Amino acid sequence: MHKIIGLLLFALVVGCSQIDHPPADVGGAFSGGTTQDGPVIAAQLTTLYGRTVANCNNSDSQPAFLCSGVTLRVTVKDPANTYKVWDPSPTSIKSGGVSFSHLRADANFGRLAWGYGNGYILYPIFETPTDKTDLDYLCSYPMDGWTWHRSETSVCVPHRDYPAQSQLCQNAGVTTAEQWLAVWNIPGGNPNLRQCGFDITDERNALAGPAFYQSLRAKTLLGITGFNGHNEVIIKTWAPGRPNTFPIMAFFYVYGGTNPKPLADAQYNQRDFYNSTNPKIVVPIIRLTPANSPTGTAIFQYAAADQAVTQ
């Protein structure tokens, strides 16, 4: 998000402040080093999850994803081992975007995308260590946007069956969660494809914050339907092969089941990331216990026994 638009002072003054790091009262970043402190990360995730602000620093030009919530991506190891789980897949490189979910206490979901059991979590931009890259957030769907059905070569675009309703929300005449819900509730058809995506790009300035917050509110308005499905936040595809500057906060796995694979996969990813970095970086594995109801609480825990790499 570090964009320099010419040398215009005006742009620096009134441009969307997603690129700026916050004053101290928003929360500090991990200070760096080769080992990210697991218990500290778990506590930080708990705080972020419970921080249900409408925006950051009371500024509409600072969307809430910059300082609150947990942005996570479920992962599956590439069978051909041609790309790492923290890098964009060939599909994402072609489309220009990577799908994540955003979990917060006021936008709960009890099941991850496709029922997968492990993945990784990004630092929120305002708490990203200074040696990491800031990623560009593009659009937010209150529910799974079925984006792989929309286009193979672009993201945040309409589906051919709903060309007017499924475009970016402001272009579809939708600016509030209630308006979004009315379109979702139209009888028949496919609501996941019919829904619009809220535009949260840097360039929207003071419109980006309200747009993201309305996307979270819309999910909550769906009640149990919203809880039973994940939302989808599209982030612009980043350059692969740069693990040392990638803003990964933690690997995670869903805790509490009897299947050993989610933890084993998280341990593989932790080792793979460690071996791919120079100098070496240990990213902690965190246990995620999802909420069991829309008003329940997700739990983030660190356990030394889960770690495959320590220093």
Image (spheres, helix red, strand yellow):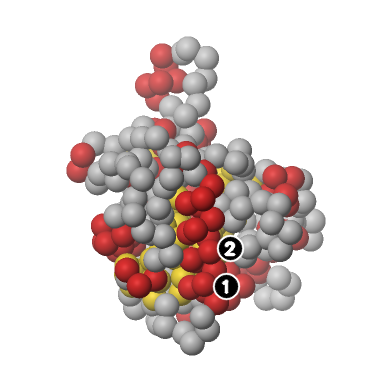
Residue 67 relative to residue 11: left or right: left
Marker disc for residue 55: none
> What quarter of the picture does the C terminus occupy?
bottom left
Q: Which residue is mark 2?
A: 75
Asked where in the image residue 127 lies, by quadrant, the reply is top left
Q: For residue 71, which quarter of the picture?
A: bottom left
Viewer-proximal residue among 286 and 72 = 286
Residue 116 higher or lower than 158, as above or below = below
Q: Residue furthest left?
A: 25
Relative to residue 1, is residue 296 depicted above or below? below
- What's under tag 1, amino acid-wise? Tyr
The residue at 48%/66% (across/down) is 267
- Observer-nearest residue: 17 or 130? 130
Residue 276 appears left or right of 150:
left
Q: Picture coordinates of residue 269 (x, y %)?
A: 53, 60
Q: Is residue 282 visible?
A: yes
**Residue 243 horizontal side relative to residue 285, left or right:** right
The residue beneath circle 1 is 116
What residue is drawn where x is 46% and y is 13%?
Answer: 8
Circle 2: residue type: Thr
Q: Secondary structure at mark 2?
A: loop
Horizontal and vertical percent position of residue 59: 32, 40
Q: CA distance from mark 1 to mark 2?
A: 8 Å
Q: Residue furthest right?
A: 160
Say if residue 212 shows up in the picture. no
